[in-house]
Image (tube, rainbow, N blue to C red):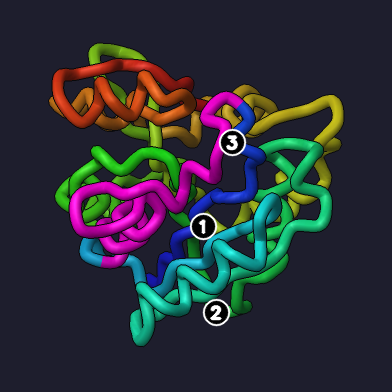
Amino acid sequence: MKIVALILAAGKSERMGVPKMLLPWGKRTILEQVVSCALEGGVQEAVVVIGDKAEVIEKKVKENLWPKPVRTVFNPDYSLGMLSSIQCGLKALNASCDATLLALGDQPTIPAIIYQNLVELFPRCGKGILIPRFQGKRGHPIIIQKKYFDFILALDPLHESMHQLTGSFPEDIFDLEVESPEILRDIDRPEDLKELAGKENCSGEGF
């Protein structure tokens, strides 16, 4: 089964004040850390959806991640929000793709083993949507089978979200309970970055 990661990195980083995807995370950038962990987890390719500050982010992706199987796609409607970026990314996937792993570019604390567990379980779980949960709360990344791509592409990014997918097909969701609060952690503000570099900070919202 070919699973391709869609890494969402198109936001304006308004609460951070600077492009958060390019902030340092150890010896990598935040975005580089996320992409690298997804690839280490077993996806065949990573497609990074960019929007705000697209040129500088694309340049850094090419400089820091080459020759890994990574490419970028520009979402001209990134100001419409996350759903528009997901739709843009889905349109850019190769027809041979069987499923996509949706990951947020601002979740660098998620280790490669989480991606690996999801990628390895998905073909065996018997469901079309795989979502990790920590203490009953859904997080990221999630894996979605190709059969749902058209449904997602038909959604209105101005008035709808990925909750329409999970709400419409609850019987086809496999919730994987994990012992990793990292699936709920993202970085929006400078204090988030400072806190995540040290002690735990549970934030973010799953689909």
Decide which of 184, 10 is in the foreground and name it.
10
Residue 130 visible in the picture: no
The residue sitting at 41% across, 30% down in the picture is: 187
Q: Is residue 125 left or right of residue 99?
A: left
Cα distance between the residues tagged 3 and 1: 19 Å
- Residue that extends furthest to the bottom in the rendered view of this protein: 67
Decide which of 32, 114 is in the foreground and name it.
32
Q: Residue 200's spot in the image, x, y percent?
A: 19, 18
Give the residues drawn in magenta, as a range. Answer: 15-39
Q: Residue 19's spot in the image, x, y percent?
A: 54, 45
Q: Residue 41's spot in the image, x, y percent?
A: 23, 60
Seen in the picture, residue 2 relative to 87 is either above or below; the reply is: below
- Residue that extends furthest to the front in the rendered view of this protein: 17
> Of the residues under marks 2 and 3, which one precedes in the sequence?
3
Decide which of 65, 18 is in the foreground and name it.
18
Disc ID at residue 96 = 2
In the rendered structure, are the residues bearing label 2 and label 1 in contact, judged by CB atoms less than 8 Å apart? Answer: no
The residue sitting at 66% across, 55% down in the picture is: 53
Seen in the picture, residue 117 relative to 135 is either above or below; the reply is: below
> Of the residues under marks 3 and 1, which one precedes in the sequence?
1
Residue 45, quarter of picture: bottom left
Q: Helix, strand or loop at disc 3? A: loop
Disc ID at residue 13 = 3
Pick the quarter of the image with the N terminus: bottom left
Residue 192, quarter of picture: top left
The residue labelled by disc 1 is: 6
Cα distance between the residues tagged 2 and 3: 33 Å
Identity, as a three-letter code, of the amino acid under mark 2: Ser
Q: Nearer the viewer, mark 2 or mark 1?
A: 1
Q: Residue 126's spot in the image, x, y percent?
A: 36, 47
Seen in the picture, residue 76 relative to 46 is either above or below; the reply is: above
